[in-house]
Image (cartoon, grey):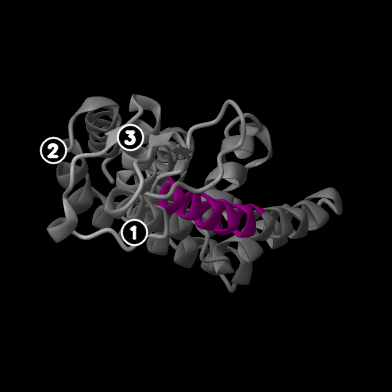
Amino acid sequence: KMVNGVVVAHGRTRSLVEKFERGRFTGSEDQMISVSPEVIADRIKSSTMPKEEPQVSGREPLSLSDVNIMEDLMLNHDVLLSGLRSRLTKLQMVRHLWERNDIKGAIIALKKLPDHSVQADVISVLMEKMEIVTMDLFSCLLPMLVGLLDSKMERHVKMSLEMLLKLVAAFGPTIRLTISAPPSVGIDLHQEERIESCKQCLGQLQQLQAVLPTLARRGGSLAKSALELSLVLRDKHM
């Protein structure tokens, strides 16, 4: 008699097969029975193969490392998105002042923003509009440009060095002449303020000279810009 693909003899053998089918077959009852290869293969496969999660057709199952990578990407995406939104808000504030032709107000607001990326963005615009930069604006820009040299982003440092190079070349002689000029007769508050502003700029430029060798040791384009600025400062007797 056949029972689920197994040839069963009457008596004890039939009892063994029935126990096997009910999952109660033990090693002590290892009697010889005739089982078809297909049944054996199915039994082995179902009992030894680990259970797998259902898979979407055409896709490999996600490993734990894949899941971790996806979580990291989503987290980084949220951080990046938040940073870009904050950057946009700050740029819009500076643009509002700029469009009112309050360039000095925009620079002062920019100095108060602890965001090197926004500062570098505005400086990149100013570099294309050097005709609007006055000595008064230079005195406002200088502290921010020096602070930008501490940025961890090479782009920010290079932008600052390039802007400083333009400003020192343009206003270096004015600073030196204003400070060395003989005192005027009478009281001239505007002249006194101008002299004081030039003295502050000269002091900051002299401090800058001490920073440039460190930047030059970083090599690459930063080293070239730092060396160029150092030569210009010496040439202008800063």
Residue 208 placement (x, y as % from top left):
27, 52
Left or right of 88 in this view: 62: left
Helix, strand or loop for disc 1 = helix
Q: Is residue 186 magenta?
A: no
Q: Residue tagged by mark 2?
A: 217
Q: Disc 3 or disc 2, which is closer to the eye?
A: 3
**Crowd tier of the residue under label 1, counting other residues whose Cα lies within 10 Å: few below 14, some 14–19, many 20 or above:** some
Amino acid carrying label 3: it is Ile
Res. 42 image quadrant: top left
Which mark sits nearer the N-terminus, 1 or 2?
A: 1
Residue 140 placement (x, y as % from top left):
55, 59
Give how far apart the Cα atoms at labels 1 and 2 are.
21 Å
Res. 157 image quadrant: top left
Magenta residues?
66-84
Q: Residue tagged by mark 3?
A: 40
Give the vertical position of 188 relative to 99 (above or below). Answer: below
Tell me the tag on residue 204. 1
- The residue positioned 40% from the left and 45% from the top of the image is 63
Q: Main secondary structure of the magenta part?
A: helix
Give how far apart the Cα atoms at labels 1 and 3 are.
88 Å
- The residue positioned 34% from the left and 54% from the top of the image is 20
**Crowd tier of the residue under label 3, counting other residues whose Cα lies within 10 Å: few below 14, some 14–19, many 20 or above:** few
Residue 44 placement (x, y as % from top left):
31, 40
Return the residue nearer the eye: 188 or 13.
13
Which mark sits nearer the N-terminus, 3 or 2?
A: 3
Amino acid carrying label 1: it is Gln
Left or right of 87 in this view: 146: left
User: What residue occupies the far front of the structure in this picture?
Assistant: 10
User: Does the rendering let one see residue 76?
Assistant: yes
**Crowd tier of the residue under label 2, counting other residues whose Cα lies within 10 Å: few below 14, some 14–19, many 20 or above:** few
Return the residue nearer the eye: 9 or 101.
9
